[in-house]
Amino acid sequence: MIDLMKLPLVYHHDYSPAFDPAHRFPMEKFHLLHQHLYDIGLIKQCDLFAPTLINDSLLELAHDKHYIERFKTNLLTDKEIRRIGLPWSEALVRRTRLAVGGSVLSMELALERGLSAHLAGGTHHAHRDFGSGFCIFNDLAVCALHALRRDDVERVMIIDLDVHQGDGTANILANEPKAITVSFHCKQNFPARKATSDYDIDIDRHTEDEHYLQLLKGHLPYLLELHQPDLVLYDAGSDPYEHDALGLLNISAEGLAKRDYFVLTECVQRRIPVSCVIGGGYMKDRQHLARIHSIVHQTAARVWQEYFA
């Protein structure tokens, strides 16, 4: 039975297939995140949903159908695989399609209930016909374009606070005026060649909490008022964290919690539905990484209690 009084979370046990533990991409973090949320009791307080595999027709909203098919059938070139940075496997194909399906499900739940959170997602470096930076299909672009087909959504805003610019998202949605792309990112970080979002807020390396939050508070309320979106897709990347291996910013765990609370409350106070995805996060201590990723889910649960319960 659907419990409309609980925050919806989205997760699938196949998000973390068997993977080289020495690889730079921490594939096990999704499982560890779910386990951490269970251990602290948050899973029991929420309504947990499992996605199904995304179908090709939805992927084709944002991606070239030949690229989709070549990835699914292991026909990408070695160069294309290196650019993605993940070794191909049937298990990777399955988890990729499940994760995009999970972001779509989270988006639909947000429109139904006002707020939702996915335990994966945020693959913003994937472009229309190639993958990059550990990203194969762009769930944010798929969700935005799928949402815009609905009668109750005229404008979607993507608020991307991953430390890396959402270049794939910006390029895929460049000619869609109803999808507003907003990226707060470290300007010295990947990708070296930045795309052009609707709004790009460059942040200098080593920026700390106070200035980071000032930038967010100085831009986000204005943009929400200006565009009045019917849906926000929030990429709550944990990689601005001060101990992230690929971050270059110096944001504390408390700073991330303040960031997430500000974004979510700015949206829900305006009655804008928000779907959260976790974005990037890279640390050798995978248990620590899971705890940092969990900040957005814990914050979403707090906001749910304050505004929806």
Image (cartoon, rainbow, N blue to C red):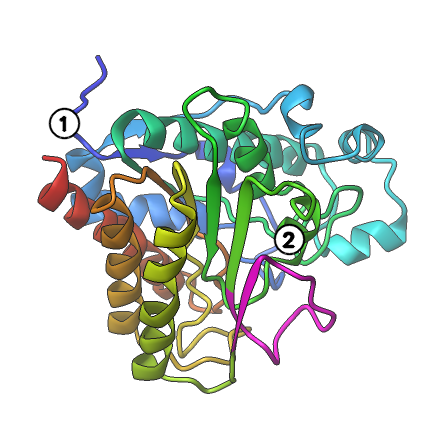
Callout 2: few (<14), some (14-19), or many (20+) C-alpha neighbours within 10 Å? many
Q: Amino acid at mark 1?
A: Met
On screen, 163 above or below 272? Answer: below
Magenta span: chief secondary structure: loop
Of the two numbered discs 2 and 1 in the rendering, the one whose residue sits closer to the viewer: 2
Question: Magenta stretch: residue 189 in it?
Answer: yes
Q: Position of residue 208 (x, y in %)?
A: 36, 84
Residue annotated with mark 2: 170
Q: Position of residue 78 (x, y in %)?
A: 88, 51
Answer left or right for 97 relative to 266: right
Residue at the far bottom in the pictured view: 206
Identify the image quadrant of residue 237.
Answer: bottom left
Q: Position of residue 175 (x, y in %)?
A: 69, 44
> In the image, what residue occupies the spot 44% across and 29% down?
153
Residue annotated with mark 1: 5
Identify the image quadrant of residue 238.
Answer: bottom left
Answer left or right for 131 relative to 20: right
Q: Amino acid at mark 2?
A: Ala
> In the image, what residue occupies the spot 55% across and 27% down?
146
On screen, 300 above or below 223? Answer: above
Q: CA distance from mark 2 to mark 1?
A: 35 Å
Q: Depth check: give the residue in front, 54 or 90.
A: 54
Q: Depth check: give the residue in front, 233 or 77.
A: 233
Please, what secondary structure does the residue beneath circle 1 have?
A: loop
Please, what secondary structure does the residue beneath circle 2 have?
A: helix
Q: Which residues are magenta?
A: 184-202
> In the image, what residue occupies the spot 74% across and 70% down?
193
On screen, 15 above or below 284? Answer: above
Quadrant showing the N terminus? top left
Question: Magenta stretch: residue 169 in it?
Answer: no
Label pair 2/1, CB-CB below 8 angstroms: no
Q: Position of residue 248 (x, y in %)?
A: 51, 80
